[in-house]
Amino acid sequence: MIKRISLAAFTLLATYAGFAQQVEFTEYELDNGLDVILHQDNTAPVVTVGVMYHVGAKDEEEGRTGFAHFFEHLLFEGTENIDRGEWFNIVAANGGSNNANTTQDRTYYYETFPSNNLKLGLWMESERMLHPVINQIGVDTQNEVVKEEKRTRIDNAPYGKIIYSTGISPYMFEKHPYKNSVIGTMEDLDAAQLDEFKAFFDKYYGPNNATLVIAGDFEEEETKKWIKSYFASIPKGPEVERIDIKEEPITEEIVATEYDDNIQIPAKLYVYRTPSMKERDAYVLDMISSILTDGKSSRMYKKMVDEDKEALQVLAFPRSQEDYGMYVMGALAMGDTPLEQLGESMDEEIKKLQTELISEKEYQKLQNKFENRFVSSNSSVQGIAASLATYHMLYGDVDLINDEIKIYRSITREDIKEVANKYLKKNQRLNLDYLPTPESK
């Protein structure tokens, strides 16, 4: 996902005159390898403490899928100094909120507190890193939680296999672990032994595989002392060997059908494998998505929904990841519209991008949209914290929080045409019919 800067309301107004506020930050590393990023903003008495670990679903062993996401739940169970089940109570009692999330590439935990509780947030995250209690009762409890999450979000949710890629990724990746879903399989989690969970923590949850971010109302020198006190003594973990698996190019269209018990409206999907989110082409594909389906004046919406009334809804978006990405296009059929017809209409829009430069008027509208996205995103210190950690860990460039808009500004009409020709080819895609199961019709 592309992250951008956050601005106060008065700055948002200023941006429309062409100005953008810089997000200032301090970056340094502790002796144990923990990367630290500080963004001080004393305009409101709120502070976010976040820790991002460079471990995601792609780092799991074959036959043990779901471990990274499972830890997103397990590490709220408790620590040697935080009783089981008390984590959320402590946060709430001190006026805070907290959460965590997992992707294929990383896992992120954070708390947002009134700024006078910054020290508490630092202590809690140091406890999670140094003293988690990983026992059988916690594993069994969270196993049931994860199973319910899978049932709710994927198994019983309309289009759940598309939203969470479980019905897409296995077609797009043969070797790379991106073929597996983030939530994993319940069979793998059921089969795992307690020692395997402990080993996973020991391998990936060391300070040298983490980035600590603090954003909001604090005093830098005092905060640096607290960080040293809570984190500097945590032992360095083993060096993590990064996944380096190359996929062979897709050279022939993959035609497939998936069924969903929870839907009544069929969909046609085209999915293309794309480069790492760090590549400039990934930014161009983001712009192409906007051209195709961003708003009622977008090309696919105007043609397929408004004019031809063949689609109930259309979609086009890049699913950006550290090693490879995917580009997903699709349409939900209106009435009895054949899916083949939807596919032909999508191909027509792709062909236009590949053979014609977008107009100057459309190009300026596109640039304005991305300027506005840049200045209106990350509207909280919580968002800035997550962006700083993401840019550092997955992009290797924290300065992108300020400089990313320059990449979008540099993209030309010719670039859009070139990238459409490079990636949106028929012989490089998954052609998927996503249908209701016959019994549900």
Image (cartoon, grey):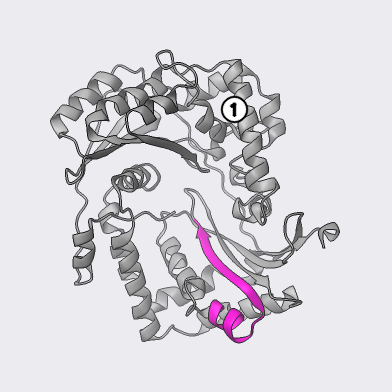
Judge whether residue 86 is colored magenta: no
> Picture coordinates of residue 240 (x, y %)?
46, 30
156 or 269: which is nearer to us? 156
Q: Is residue 335 left or right of residue 17?
A: right
Determine crowd level at label 1: few under 14, some 14-19, many 20+ residues with C-alpha closer than 10 A: many
User: Which residue is identified by label 1?
Assistant: 142
Looking at the rendering, in which quadrant would you find the N terminus? Answer: bottom left
Q: Could you say whether the residue bearing mark 1 is in a helix, strand or loop? A: helix
Q: Is residue 267 above or below residue 21?
A: below
**Mark 1 belongs to which amino acid?**
Gln
Q: Is residue 241 above or below residue 300?
A: above
> Picture coordinates of residue 233 (x, y %)?
30, 16
Judge whether residue 303 is colored magenta: yes
Q: Is residue 329 left or right of residue 209?
A: right
The quarter holding residue 82 reads: top left
Residue placed at 47% from the left, 48% from the top? 322
Q: Is residue 395 visible?
A: yes
The quarter holding residue 224 reads: top left
Q: What residue range appears in magenta? A: 300-319
Q: Is residue 65 visible?
A: no
Name, please, the residue furthest toward the top. Answer: 80
Q: Is residue 7 above or below residue 110?
A: below
Q: Is residue 435 left or right of residue 168?
A: right
Residue placed at 61% from the left, 58% from the top? 249
> Picture coordinates of residue 353 (x, y %)?
51, 79
263 or 58: which is nearer to us? 263
